Image (spheres, rainbow, N blue to C red):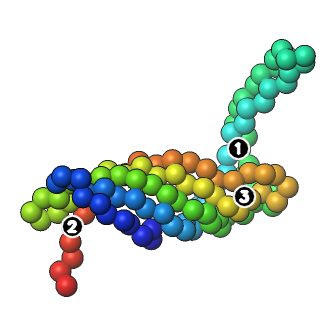
Amino acid sequence: MSPHVKQRIGKFEGIVSLGPELRYRVGKMKLKYTSKITYDGVVTKDESGVVKMDGGFGQRAFDYGLAGGAGIAYPTKSFKIFAEARYHLGLRRLVDDLKMYNRGTSFHVGVLVPMPR
């Protein structure tokens, strides 16, 4: 769980989050690639595609990394509505012999409901 920092902007609250992240892959891994070959500054071959990696290849299902984001929350009488964008930075190689890491962005919209103490 990421620590959140709150700052009020009028009635809105600013949210900044940063922290560790643990992931476990449950499905099959796909490798998306783009390849460009240039000769004297001119692209001679340009291709992209998807390779399904069905098993083996030294694949790792467990991954760890960092996540950081920013967003806003709008408080009402009984709950808060929020929106936040995050960047996910994987720090562990997903395959033994390749420099392949998890990287991505996510956008979250939701409702925060306080729990009674």
Callout 2 amino acid: Val
Measure how far apart labels 1 and 2 are at the Cα level. 39 Å
Pick whichever of labels 1 and 2 is earlier in the sequence: 1
- Would you name the residue on which mark 3 appears? 94
Pick whichever of labels 1 and 3 is earlier in the sequence: 1
Q: Position of residue 56 (x, y in %)?
A: 79, 59
Q: Position of residue 116 (x, y in %)?
A: 17, 80
Residues marked 1 and 2 touching at CB (< 8 Å):
no
Question: 30 left or right of 10?
Answer: right
Q: Is residue 80 above or below residue 106?
A: below
Question: 44 left or right of 114?
Answer: right
Measure how far apart labels 1 and 3 are at the Cα level. 11 Å
Q: Residue at x 36, y 65 (%)?
A: 5
Label 1 element class: strand
- Would you name the residue on which mark 1 appears? 31
Q: Residue at x 76, y 25 (%)?
A: 47
- Would you name the residue on which mark 2 appears? 113
Q: Position of residue 114 (x, y in %)?
A: 20, 72
Q: Report crowding for label 1: few under 14, some 14 to 19, many 20 or more residues within 10 A (C-alpha).
A: few
Q: Residue at x 48, y 63 (%)?
A: 18
